[in-house]
Image (cartoon, rainbow, N blue to C red):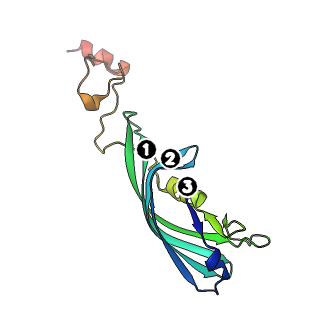
Amino acid sequence: MIKLNLAKLLEEPVGSRMSFDLDEGQQTLAEDLHVEFVRGTIEFIRTSRGILGKGHLHSQVKLQCARCLETFSQPLDLDLEAQFGIPRGKPREGSVFPIGVNGILNLDEALREQILLNLPMRPLCKPDCRGLCPECGHNLNEGPCDCIREAIDPRLEKLKELL
């Protein structure tokens, strides 16, 4: 969990700023998302609606290649911008992420959302990944398999007789 103490900033006037340098190791942001590290700087600005957090972060997640099914590390550059709600009373509209009553902000949910939005739709371990053999399932990145590929489209089989 990445927790930041914003209690002092909550007492400051509108326009006040506070920044944090993050250098966190492995984190589990949810049961479906594990990051290897999170690094960067986040600046928090006191607004009339709560606190605005802005920052540029670097992270890395483990993904499974869509072609060869191997696990690989995917680096991510994240631009975080989120509104955090004031803990007193009802959260105002537009404040997406709540701040705890004691002024402690759990950054996990905002970070998780940003990482999920930046993940590739079809993750590949490398751009020229060759995938798996459709016959035997061998990883073609490790070399060719022993399958004989003479499959002919059944619609074109009659043309073979002419040769």
Q: Quadrant of residue 68?
A: top left
Query: At 41% from the left edge and 44% from the top edge, which residue is drawn?
Result: 123
Circle 2 crowding by C-alpha within 10 Å: few under 14, some 14–19, many from 20: some
Find residue 109 and report its horizontal and vertical position in percent. Answer: 60, 57
Q: Which residue is mark 2?
A: 34
Q: Quadrant of residue 44?
A: bottom right
Which structural element holds mark 2? strand
Q: How many marks?
A: 3
Which structural element holds mark 1? strand
Relative horizontal placement of residue 94, taking residue 41 as reference (left or right): right
Q: Which residue is mark 1?
A: 62
Q: Which residue is mark 3?
A: 112
Find residue 73 and report its horizontal and vertical position in percent. Answer: 38, 46
Distance in Å between CA atoms under marks 1 and 2: 7 Å
Quadrant (top left/top right/bottom left/bottom right) for the C terminus: top left
Distance in Å between CA atoms under marks 3 and 1: 14 Å
Q: Which mark is residue 9?
A: none
Q: Are marks 3 and 1 in contact (CB under 8 Å)?
A: no
Q: Amino acid at mark 3?
A: Arg
Q: Earlier in the sequence, mark 3 or mark 2?
A: 2
Q: Earlier in the sequence, mark 1 or mark 2?
A: 2
Query: At 35% from the left edge and 19% from the top edge, which residue is drawn?
Result: 136
Q: Nearer the viewer, residue 101 or 151?
A: 101
Distance in Å between CA atoms under marks 3 and 2: 9 Å
| Residue farthest toward the right in the current orientation of the protein | 89
Which structural element holds mark 3? helix
Q: Earlier in the sequence, mark 3 or mark 1?
A: 1
Residue 13 vertical position relative to residue 21 in the rendered view, above or below = below
Q: Are marks 1 and 2 in contact (CB under 8 Å)?
A: yes
Q: Amino acid at mark 1?
A: Lys
Q: Amino acid at mark 2?
A: His
* Mark 3 or 2: the one toward you: 2
